[in-house]
Image: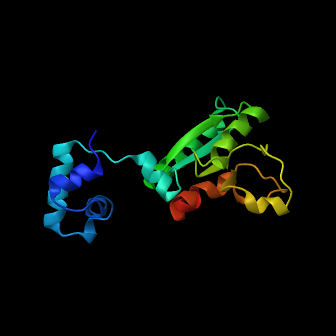
Amino acid sequence: MATMKEVAQLAGVSTATVSRALMNPEKVSSATRKRVEDAVLESGYAPNSLARNLRRNESKTIIVIVPDICDPYFSEIIRGIEDTAAEHNYLVLLGDSNQQLKRESTFVNLVFTKQADGMLLLGADVPFDVSKPEQKNLPPLVMACEYAPELDVILISVKSFAALKIRQPSTII
């Protein structure tokens, strides 16, 4: 696997220019961009998305915790979440909690350990116990379908979900 340094040598530019040409192509001339693209093809270079996400402090992944994957009620909701996430280059990790707090906690830990950027809870159970003062430390969290009055979080009801998808898809993520 080729490195960015090898691409830079092949193209006759710096590694910063390679990075710029790949991430912000409008910031380099068309001739330089073409040289970098040719060097990428020749070398077989592929960006390391894990390293890029680590630098950006994001995983481009959200977790959707569903209480029962077999319940058809959730199928259209999950499809809407998937479609909206894909429009914003996010991956959705679907977690079927089977209404078990231990399984829900496992999914929540992926967010706390920065393996996912946020979560949507489709059930009524809140998989952690936090007081109001501690809620400021919660990761990005959206309740959908159910309401937990003890949490100060965004709530998306089934009625507002269709409108939200049309008007503000970035609110979900």
* Residue 79 image position (x, y, % from top left): 53, 43
Residue at 27% x, 71% y is 27
Q: How many marks?
A: 0
Residue 124 placement, left or right of 91: right
Residue 81 locus on image (x, y percent): 55, 48
Between 72 and 27, the one nearer to me in the picture: 27
Rendered location of residue 119, percent (x, y): 64, 49
Which quarter of the image is occupied by the C terminus? bottom right
The residue at the point 64 percent across, 47 percent down is 111
Residue 120, image x and y in percent?
A: 65, 49
Q: Residue at x 79, y 43 (%)?
A: 125
Residue nearest the viewer, comparing 167 with 92: 92
Q: Is residue 118 visible?
A: yes
In the rendered image, the vertical position of residue 92 relative to residue 100, given as above or below: below
Q: Residue at coordinates 28% horizontally, 59% vertically from top-left?
A: 15
Q: Quadrant of residue 105?
A: top right
Residue 24's place in the image compared with 40, above or below, is: below
81 lies left or right of 30 = right
Q: How is the image coloured?
A: rainbow
Residue 17 is left or right of residue 118, and the answer is left
Q: Is residue 95 above or below residue 90?
A: above
For the N terminus, the quadrant is top left
- In this rendered view, identify the residue nearer to me: 142 or 34: 34
Residue 152 seen: no
